[in-house]
Amino acid sequence: MTIWPRMAVCIAWLCVTGSILVAASERDNAAVDGPWALHIIDSSSRGADGVRLADVNGDSLMDVTTGWEQGGVTRVYIHPGYAGVRQRWPAVTVGQTPSVEDAVFVDLDSDGAVDVISSCQGGTKRLFVHWAPPDKSDYLNPAGWRTEVFPACDGLTRWMFAAPMEVDGKYGIDIVAGGKDAAAQIGWLEAPAKPRSVSDYRWHPICPAGWIMSIILSDMDSDGDLDVAISDRFGPMRGCRWLQNPGTGPAQYQPWKNHFIGATGVEAMFMEIADLDDDKLDDIVVAVKPKSILYIRRLDATGLSWQQHEIALPDSAGTTKAVAVGDIDKDGRKDIVFTCENARGKHGVGWLSYQNAVTDSKWIHHDISGDKLGIKYDRIELLDLDGDDDLDMLTTEESQACPERSRGDGVGLGVIWYENPH
């Protein structure tokens, strides 16, 4: 056999192999960019409104708490392990919470059992604590939970969000909380010597607010203590800003100094703090109505110098609600996941990757939810739920008519997660 037939065979082999590789690549891209598999954790009530995480039983798997706004209950979901993660999760209703907007885990009395704080708006205007049963084997028994109201916060505002924080260095965990309406404010609830004595908690206002969407605890000025970063949707101080921790002692009971970050004068929704450009400085990424995301790049460690860049959402998406940052396709670069409201017949969940630089105004859109299900999504958590070493997407949906039940809009898909196909 001469060299020419041999070369012809090699070329033919390379062509066939190349075609196979291209076809495989195209299939992989189609799988990645198409809708991700949807899994429902719970759809038992109405109006699931956000997700918060903690490992409540020490198995190194994250559990979830959610408030059901229209259903008026707060529930906890225990991660069932990787084998059962695509089924309904074990759950417990920890308390009755009319118009609940947010629920968050915290071991408030330091007894080793993880409690839950519920923030309620509407006509309720209350912060509730749900005391967990001290025996972990009773955690899923609703009779083991006890719900109480913090009198110091009763009726002050329509409570929207809360974050556990050790503010004053005394007694135990305090609670930073914010609300909405004409009397909206953000402040902190001081824990007493006996944390089970709810009547002894004291409320300390930090500053006025319009409509608090996010409360994130972070050392914004690199001075070694936690400050409070917020996104505020409405009012004269709307936008993203941070409130400077005044330190210990009597200064804690005074208003905290306000520093604007960006998104001023626009409708800022949920935000995230993340080092998007990998320069060792944490940036701000925030969803903005009607249809954009702002990347607000931190320029130095003081927290006083920022540079704002707008990223547009595709026309096929709804209106922007929430964002999260993580490496979705495992290419070593940070991506942005987003959720939307007003997504009937549109994409309600997707992720964005940049082509050249994080400051690009147009990022590449990748579908997660499709455009057939989902109308009003909420806050996002990115974590590996199924143990396959990539980031899945956890959220809630509160307006879609759930296909597994014959009830109308307002029921919602519930507490859900989308499985990353990478």
Image (cartoon, rainbow, N blue to C red):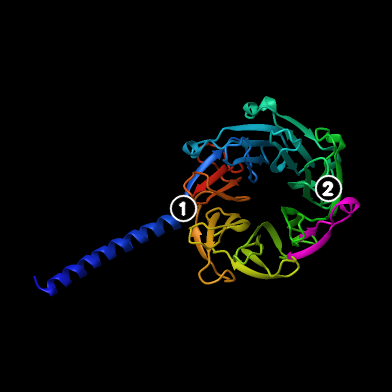
Q: Which residue is mark 2?
A: 168
Tell me the kind of residue under disc 2: Asp
Name the one closer to the observer, 329 or 376. 329
Q: Is residue 208 visible?
A: yes
The quarter of the picture where the C terminus appears is bottom left
Q: Is residue 86 above or below residue 255?
A: above
For the residue carrying disc 1, how many other residues have a C-alpha within 10 Å: few (<14), some (14-19), or many (20+)? many
Look at discs 2 and 1 and give the one toward the viewer: 2
Residue 390 lies, in percent from the top left, at 49, 51
Q: Which residues are magenta?
A: 242-261
The quarter of the picture where the N terminus appears is bottom left
Q: SS of the residue at dot 1?
A: loop
Q: SS of the residue at dot 2?
A: loop
Name the one closer to the observer, 375 or 151. 151
Residue 251 forms part of the magenta stretch = yes
Residue 302 lies, in percent from the top left, at 75, 66
Tell me the kind of residue under disc 1: Pro
Residue pushed farthest bottom?
A: 4
Residue pushed farthest left?
A: 1
Distance of label 2 from label 1 (alpha carbons): 47 Å
Which label belongs to residue 35?
A: 1
Residue 326 forms part of the magenta stretch = no
Q: Quadrant of residue 52?
A: top right
Residue for point 41% across, 55% down: 31
Contact (Cβ within 8 Å) of mark 2 with mark 1:
no
Residue pushed farthest right?
A: 250
Earlier-in-chain disc, 2 versus 1: 1
